[in-house]
Amino acid sequence: MNFEQVIGLEVHCELKTHSKMFSAAPVTFGEDVNTMVNEVDLGMTGTMPVLNKRGVEFAIRVCHALHMEIDELLCFDRKNYYYSDLPKGFQITQDKRPIGRNGYLDIEVDGEVTRVEIERLHMEEDTAKQFHFDDYSLIDYNRAGIPLIEIVTRPNIGNGAQAAAYLEKLRQVFLYTDVSDAKMEEGSMRCDVNISIRPFGSEEFGIRTEIKNLNSISNVQKAIEFEAMRQEKVLIQGGEVKQETRRFDEDSKETVVMRAKGDAVDYKYYTEPNILPIRLDHQWVMQIKDELPMMADERAKLYIEKHGLPQTDANILVASKDISDFYEETIQTCQEYKLVCNWLLGEVQAYLNKENLTIQQTKLTPAYLGKMISFIQDGTISSKQAKKVFECLMSEGKDPEVIIEEKGMKQISDPTTLTNIINEVLDANEQSIQDYAAGKDRAVGFLVGQIMKKTGGQANPKVTNQILIQLLKARVQ
Amino acid sequence: MNDIEKMLKQLGRKTMFDVSDEEMPALIEEYNVFMSHVQALEAIDTTDVEPLAFPYEIETTYLRDDDETYVISREDALKNAKNIQDNQIKVPKVVG
Amino acid sequence: MIQYSIEELHQLFASKAIDPKAYYDELFEEVELQQKRLNAFVTITKEKAYADLKEAHFENLLNGIPYVLKDNYNTKGIKTTASSRMLEDYVPVYNAHVVDLLSKQGVCLVGKASMDELAMGGTNKSALTGPVYNPWDTSRIAGGSSGGSAALVASGVVPFALGSDTGDSIRKPAGFCGIVGFKPTWGRISRYGVIPYASSLDTVGAFTRNVRDMAIVTEAMAGRDNRDMTSSFKEVPHYLENLTDDIKGLKIAVLTSVSDEIRNPEIKANFESIVETLKNLGAIVENVTMPTQLMRTLLPTYTIIANSEATSNHSCLDGIKYGNRQPGKTTDDVMINSRTHGFGDHIKRRFILGNLALATENQERMFRKAQRVRRLIVEELNKIYQDYDIILTPNGGSIAPKVDEAYDDRLSDEYLILENHLSLANFAGTPSLSLPSGFVDGMPIAVNLSGRIFEEQTVLNCAYALENALNFKNQYKREG
């Protein structure tokens, strides 16, 4: 029997606001434990939540980017459960009326475009962080209350590769809307998977399992692929898939049972009585849409249509917002689109890979990269020299003009100067002129070598070649 | 233990209480009163009546400015905790 | 001499007619005596009061005035227990908003008053420190849940005290103790920092011995607080300045669905005389009713909503971050043991039943049903306010019960309607004031005046007129 997979994803994303979703404590990462809290985050009895404006703004940005309908009346609910990382004994979330509904994201896998339908986006708050030791756990409340958005797809993802593509694309949305650093390894982006399988053509859904504890996009894909196989085996052997929560075990690359359905907690959702419904200003919601930064797709389109970049290059450029941003800044000063692109995807990317750095961590600035490329373009330096300049640019961050000066790299491109030098070389190499006249092409190469030797490699090769041929032809006649 | 007792015992557990056998009769009694309340409400026709979660229908427009932050000292944060280690609250090992 | 009102005391301090220090010395002697008699304090904050007094210059009405807080107001550095074992040693690290507001006015905190555990009761018998006794007869209860605050104002120890009111927790004890108790509009005063009971019903309010003082205290606390999203931006009127006892033409509705339930003939007669008094003052007083079947649902609706919200509100009390932690093998055990140990039996029962009503499988039939009925009740009530400025009812059907005869749960019709109608003002969020109206068997009784939301002034004016026409202003009872 052939099965198809039915997959839905729930993604949580931590927002990089300054303060928490319902408390004025700062949002920070890596600070000393329990120093970024106030009485609200600790669930001190009597405290009350107050919604963060920027938290809402960020949620709206993502809603717009995902083409969602926005509910301009914000309503919040309590999700009640007891757990040591949940200081209030409930989480404030949006159960009944999420801020965003009915969105989508188009993804591409092996050249085939699929639309992932998004059911909802809602705002909520993060829990405290627990550190587990052999026989005890420690709780740090710095994370408690950090704004989260949760994005839930409809169950219309068909396989692990699509899920991975969706997550990659969604991650881009978080980065391009500038609402989160969206790092799955660090937990600022998290994903839970709901997966079931059914015979091809079947209308009914199979029994689904939920997979948690996935800390990278590739693990999501692996977990889905394993789980689909597992479910298939169960069904083929005449068994029944159990509705349960599983987690992905990174060592064995398998999903293992966390808890059965019977242990599921009843969250007893009800309207948060301390937050009145909040009416958003329609103008503001629309303004956020107008001011939305360009998403990856739009940028790629612009690069292809307006900058004349090949599609593959454009797609690679926008795959990283950092690189795409850098490209956009560089072309402010240097409109050599293709060259800028080549440098970023070539030398720059190679350097970053080798040093394991992000582009912001280097000393390279868009202005200097642009300047260097302009120097190549106007013949001030050769491509070969540029590689040396680039090395200094990365390691020292100096102005390319200064580097060129210091290294004495400036190319000789002035025709008069070059003509004099070349004539001197020709005078000294009568044999080569004879060879040239006899049709031996090697002679040109030899002469260029001599010119380079004489100029310490600074002669502009292009101009040199031109003048040399001219002068040779004149002497042979 | 009859079904209601069992249900209440479980519900107690879900509310993070251990309901002892001695406490059960009083709980059953209050449960019966509670269910009579539920019944009293069932007698009221609430067709097309929306739940009222606040005393009156009101909306607000206020949202907090994200730029103003407020923290308390770690000393204050942990002041009332009974078990602390390495500036964190210590609990028996939590199994996720 | 420890019995002055806010205005009197201000006058005496400001004019230097009495020495504030000497006054406070005498006050704390009285505090000791009354504590023995009434058991109304959880914590006496003598040092804090003297420290506050040092800063006082008596330039405004509340400056240097002694007061008491119900023990569910968070006070930074001062133990706040809500009369629960769970919070026995809890010392908050922040102040409730109104505590800060009053401190800015220069008030002096005398102590934290006993209450029903977590404000969940009407007798004050569930307090960790035991019952609070009624100053007029110490074999009787002061009422609850704000029993300690009521008793301390009624014994003349302080001119005002704060309480909190979820169903009648200010107004019921005010009536039992013969003083003024006022629950303003939900949203008029910030609840930030007040240990909650049921957030959609909870209201901050005060006890005083006269209406003018109530206008002063309410004005000091009212207004927007950005830490409480439900607090109103509406401007706060100058309640004291605008206070008038001219109520000619004021339209008052006598809610006979309540008053007809009175069985005690003396209370009935008293209520009728109050109606006459109001007519004589020029008010237009007419009878109105609400559907009886709906009136009988007041207690069921209240019980379900209040217990459900309470169980969620108090989920934070798990012994982990603060509170009375008990040992356990697992973290769940720690929570279970702490909560089992930390709460009184009746509180646990209410939390469990609140959870029952919130459970997803029951919520539509129980909690949400109660919220729907609440809407019907509020709509009926607001119909009356379309035509009337004030709704008048008896405060209750009896005098304060004997300590050993006071129970919370009775289901007779008289009880269902007459003893629970004060919750109408919580369901609808309306301002509601209880005013002493006479005595039965030597015990004070009261009437209740409620108005439209945010019309505190109208309620205060009506109460002021009635108070001036009656003879119970500034009354207190002290023995020992």
Image (cartoon, coloured by chain):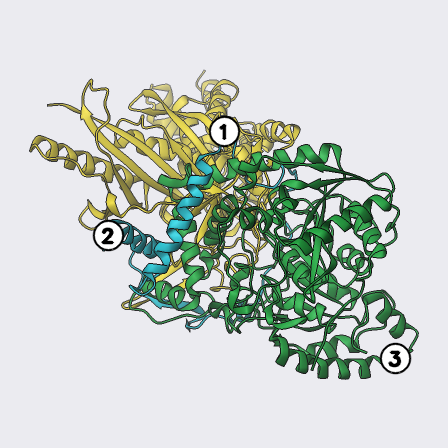
Chain colours: A yellow, B cyan, C green
Callout 1 crowding tier (Cα within 10 Å): few <14, some 14–19, many ≥20 = many
Residue wearing tag 1: A65
Which circle marks residue B2 in the picture?
A: 2
Q: Secondary structure at mark 2?
A: loop
Residues under labels 2 and 3: Cα distance? 69 Å
| Relative image position of residue A239 (x, y in whole percent) | 10, 35
Q: Position of residue A416 (x, y in %)?
A: 59, 29
Comparing C144 with C342, the one in front is: C144
Tell me the quarter of the picture where residue C427 sits. top right
- Can residue A459 be seen by looking at this rendering? no
Chain letter of the residue carrying label 3: C
From this view, report whether residue A462 is shown above or below residue C456.
Answer: above
Residue position for label 3: C18
Q: Residue under mark 1: which chain is it in? A: A
Q: Is residue A97 above or below residue C38?
A: above
Which element type, helix, strand or loop, lies under badge 1? helix
Circle 2 residues within 10 Å: few <14, some 14–19, many ≥20: few
C102 relative to B85 in the view: left or right:
right
Q: Position of residue C360 (x, y in %)?
A: 38, 41
Q: Quadrant of residue A388?
A: top left
Judged left or right of residue A22, residue A231 is left
Specify the subunit that label 2 lies on.
B
